[in-house]
Amino acid sequence: MALIDDVHQLQAVYGTGREDTRAMCNDADNGFSLLVNWNLLANRTHTLRALADGVEFARVSFTVSNLVEPEKRQKRRVGGGYSSNRMG
């Protein structure tokens, strides 16, 4: 699971191939990915935390700079809820 700004919860996909981890993990189906529509986030610095079984294992800050004006964004489904223009 991933949390953006400790507010927006997103589910990561787990089990993609990672041959580079075979020697350490004894398997290669342990990759994960997260699809995010950056246009739904406000223009500013955000924090993403990655969690496994509720325990944080990674944290990163990133800056969003959208080219789409906030008032022109449509309502879109975001992480199990709905955003009316953008996420904070």
Image: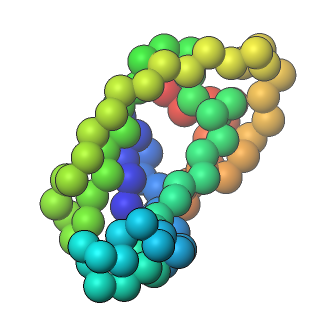
Q: Can residue 6 be seen in this view?
A: no
Badge count: 0
Which of 15 and 47 lies nearest the eye of the viewer? 15
Which quadrant of the figure has residue 49? top left
State whether residue 32 is above or below residue 3. below
Judge from the rendering whether residue 27 lies leftward or rightward of residue 51; answer left or right.
right
Q: Position of residue 38 (x, y in %)?
A: 63, 34
Screen quadrant of the N terminus: bottom left
Residue at horizontal 78 percent and vertical 28 percent from the top: 73
Judge from the rendering whether residue 86 lies leftward or rightward of residue 75; answer left or right.
left
Which quadrant of the figure has residue 41? top right
Q: Is residue 52 visible?
A: yes
Judge from the rendering whether residue 37 lies leftward or rightward of residue 73; answer left or right.
left
Task: Tell which residue pokes out farthest to the front in this image.
Answer: 23
Residue at horizontal 74 percent and vertical 41 percent from the top: 75
Which of 31 and 77 lies nearest the eye of the viewer? 31
Residue at horizontal 53 percent and vertical 55 percent from the top: 34
Q: Position of residue 56 (x, y in %)?
A: 19, 53
Q: Where is residue 86 in the image (x, y as percent from the top left)?
A: 62, 30
Residue at horizontal 16 percent and vertical 60 percent from the top: 55
